[in-house]
Image (tube, rainbow, N blue to C red):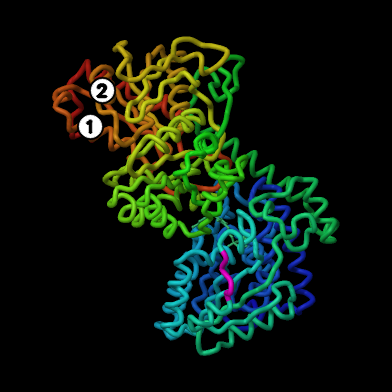
Amino acid sequence: MAIKDSSTGNVTQDYSIDQLIDTATLMRGYDLVALCAAGSGHAGGTLSIMDIAAALYLRVADHDPKNAAWPERDRIVWSTGHKAPSLYLGLAFAGFCPVEDLALLRKLWSPYQGHPHWLKLPGIEVSTGSLGQGLSIAVGVALAGKLAGKNYRTFCIMGDGEQQEGQIWEAVMEAAHHKLDNLVGIVDVNRLQIDGRVSDVMNVEPLEEKYRSFGWEVLHINGHDMQQVVAALERAKAGFGKPVVILADTVKGKGVSFMEDLAGWHGKAPSFEELRKALVELGLEERIPYQKLLDIAKFYQAEVDRRLDAKMPKFNHNYWWNCNETMKVKMEPTRKGFGQSLAKNGDDERVVCLGLDISGSITISDFYASKPERKRRWISMGIAEQSATSAAAGLAKEGLLPVLGTYATFAAARNLDQIRTSVCYGNFNVLIAGAHGGVSVGPDGATHQALEDLFAMCGLPNMSVVVPCDAIETRKATDYLLLRHEGPKYVRFAREATPIVTTEETPFEFGHANVIRLRRESPNFVEAFDTVLSRHHRNEREDLTIIACGPMVPEAMRAAWILKKDFGYETRILNLHTLKPIDLAAVLHAARETGVIITAEEHQIGALAWRVSSILTESPLLYGVPVITGAIGVQDRFGDSGAPWELIKEFEVSAEHIAHKAVELMGAKKTTHEAEPASFAKL
Ligand SMILES: Cc1ncc(C[n+]2csc(CCOP(=O)(O)OP(=O)(O)O)c2C)c(N)n1
């Protein structure tokens, strides 16, 4: 069994155990070069799974690099999508793609996305990244094999932290029930996850007894002993008359002394110096042309920069953030404000925070960081978003103030039915934080970029939704939602550092938009604007209105600057931080008084745009009043890997795109006022 020519069935490459050991080491080296070139990624888990990846792709699985879709091939599903580089290296060394291409890892438009996408690279079986789903997909693939009378095997690679997802156990049950003897699960038991030791975060042991009691065969091996790895994979492939799982004891960061068994290396890439040190340790400094690979990455990046620049709307000056002597701005991620608020308000004994294994980066752990006595009210739930959401409802029912948060895709989509029924239907006082909203999440790619969460959250009865514009406003919003607002509540923030455009004095009232007006150019961007509560704003007969939420507010402000300087237009900006309940009056006034409305959201177009449109079409106050509208946002497509600000350009959600749309609409406003409406025949 091995890499084959599918037309003849002949083996084209075969690897001995020694060759596999050597190639696995080489793959570790290329992995680290790719991560270094990308500047992000997951060192720990890619290194722990590498021996298994080498054995599977180079010796055990039947497949043909020249015919990736060969119907008889064995299927390999990577449920732990964050280990994508190991998958890519397995494919590269098997001959599916050039190994040098790994230098393009996590770059914009690259087939080597942060998490695997099967539509981008032949050889990838399925797209993953949201943990816990792969085994169910593998069950489907194995069932399809049975139905078609095919003999292929389906392998599914999982993590031990991932075993905390309930969906894994649904799939485990299904596989046994349907006697899927063509299914092989592999668990990379490296005993670490993001927040620390698996046994501390949420114990999953005894895994062996669990799988056995569900009706699976279990093989327990040392995942770094190539002899054992190959023997177990081949034995599992031969079949036991039931599904089989290989529990592979491994070491996170295996092969690099300063990465081994450290949770801190979970989602981290080596610096250039660390890379060189690691390559020396692996004995690869002379064998891997790392400088050439880094140059390939640089060259590709320069081309990305050039193409992105060419497609940006152009104006008389460069108005990009901090590119001028004036209008300087400080950048900070909005998520910081969330942690600051929890740190400040956490003494209230009713506050309990639920950890979902992504606590540091979303700042929810600031709740106890400098107050260890609060640890009693820190409830680690593991990677189990659905159960945690319903548990939060239970805590709220008993009078507590639960807070839970994770990436917005997992905080507001994976657990949507639990939010709907357990939390919203019961009208419980649960604060849900959707972190890492929008494309600006960056190189992790589409699976980690929440672009639909606000549709669902705004659509739920009883739910309140706030999308603050900067770190300061996030803190104020969290202060309010946590202690003063009753009922289900969702606060959404972003990962990347974005401009601070408010001050301590800037008003924040839940449910009431702010009006922002550009008054002058100033050394500091924030001082160039005046901000008042919308009800205090007097009509200034502005030319147009931009309605924005979240980090699109700073972009709207920058657009106002472009529009004033290049075109002389006066812009009213509505910071609609509260999406639900929406500030009807502010929207209606803006429509009546300016006649042009542009919405700007870092989300699929609609969470903001359609809510505003429905106000405009439904209100009798606007009957007969011409209002021209346009929408800026993601245009019905999934995200991509890339640097955060590249993605802002690629997905056309920058100030330049807002200003460009504004100019177009202002042209329409002038013609509508001067001429008859365009005939439908022209449409
Ligand atoms: C549904 C879901 N929740 C959270 C995450 C974020 N996340 C990525 S990796 C990871 C930890 C995985 O731990 P483990 O399965 O043990 O993998 P390993 O330690 O081997 O990398 C988490 C929580 C995710 N990708 N999907």
Q: Residue at x 25, y 28 (%)?
A: 584
Quadrant of the image containing the C terminus: top left
Q: Which amino acid does label 2 sit on?
A: Ala
| Residue 642 visible in the current orientation | no
Q: Which of marks 1 and 2 is nearer the N terminus?
A: 2
Q: What residue type is labelled 1?
A: Ile
Q: Decide if ligand 1 comes within 8 Å of the CB at mark 1.
A: no
Question: What x and y, as percent, mark residue 51?
Answer: 70, 70
Closer to us: 441 or 34: 441
Q: Name the image quarter holding residue 371.
A: top right
| Dot label at residue 591 | 2
Residue 285 falls left or right of residue 199: right
Secondary-structure class at tag 2: helix
Q: How far apart are marks 1 and 2 (CA)?
A: 10 Å
Q: Is residue 205 magenta?
A: yes
Q: Do the residues labelled 1 and 2 touch (CB within 8 Å)?
A: yes
Q: Residue at x 31, y 36 (%)?
A: 580
Magenta-drawn segment? 203-207
Q: Which residue is drawn at 46% across and 29% down?
A: 473
Q: In this view, does 648 lie above or below 122?
A: above
| Dot label at residue 615 | 1
Magenta span: chief secondary structure: loop
Secondary-structure class at tag 1: helix
Closer to us: 249 or 660: 249
Instruction: Report the image quarter containing ligand 1.
Output: bottom right
Residue 144 falls left or right of residue 417: right
Assess disc 2: are there few (<14), some (14-19) or many (≥20) residues with their C-alpha within 10 Å of its C-alpha: many
Question: What x and y, as percent, mark residue 262?
Answer: 71, 56
Q: Is residue 625 above or below residue 253?
A: above
| Residue 457 visible in the current orientation | yes
